[in-house]
Image: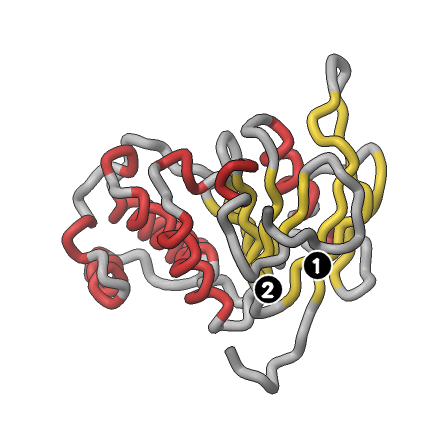
Amino acid sequence: MDENAPVRTLEARGVAVRNRQRTLLEPTSLTVRSGQVSVAYGDPGHGHTALALVLAGRLKPDRGSVSIGGIAAPKARQGTVALVDVPGVSEPDPRNKLSTVVGEELAMAGFSPARRKVRSWLGEQGFGDFGKERMEDLPGAVRIAALARLASLRDDVAFAVMTLPELHGGLPEWWMDTARVLTDENIGVLVTTSTSVAANLVDIPTYPLGQAATEAEEPA
């Protein structure tokens, strides 16, 4: 990470989300800073998706607030917070080939989606052997790495939220390697994961879903 790069802060304070039937996300507070990895943890469920949507300015919380650099307007986060493989939101069609997803993401980031450009990107990232594989068949490490790097291509992205990478066999070592690639570009990364996975993490700020604390917890 460039030590001279500006530090930006994504902060949630007591955000909670409900629908007519139930609470999707209990009040939760957390902080993500440029060039750093933070973790939010809790039982798998709607809370992970609700948190990601709130942070990205795509869902209005019923309680609490979210801001970047003190600016709370949702539009300030739309496009600035990238959602990586969020179930039901940004996860790709499992039947699509990786090359198809790469072409779509290159186009959205303003690059040419031509086949040779797709092949070039895959090769540069070390995924050249996986271009013809369907998303549902990709190894977990390749899936999360490819989707995270694609999400970071857009110029205005300052933060990335990676949701439950273990759903596709993503071991912590895998998504930490991917997170470090993003933090080296001064992107702040939040990974949401299960309580059992978070319990084994060290030297990473962790925040429990459903507990509106302002300070990061030390991993158990």
Residue designated by label 1: 10
Tell me the element at label 2.
Answer: loop
In the picture provided, is 33 more to the left or to the right than 120? right
In the picture provided, is 58 more to the left or to the right than 139? right
Residue 29 x, y percent position in the rendering: 76, 47
Seen in the picture, residue 9 relative to 26 is either above or below; the reply is below
Q: Amino acid at mark 1?
A: Leu
Seen in the picture, residue 97 relative to 126 is either above or below; the reply is above
Q: Residues within 10 Å of mark 1 (few under 14, many from 20)?
A: many
Residue designated by label 2: 158
In the picture provided, is 28 more to the left or to the right than 84? right
Instruction: Judge by depth and name the residue closer to the eye, 83 or 34.
Output: 34
Residue 71 x, y percent position in the rendering: 81, 60
Seen in the picture, residue 3 relative to 36 is either above or below; the reply is below
Q: How many marks?
A: 2
Disc 2 from disc 1: Cα separation: 9 Å
Tell me the element at label 1.
Answer: strand
Labels 2 & 1 near each other (Cβ < 8 A)? yes
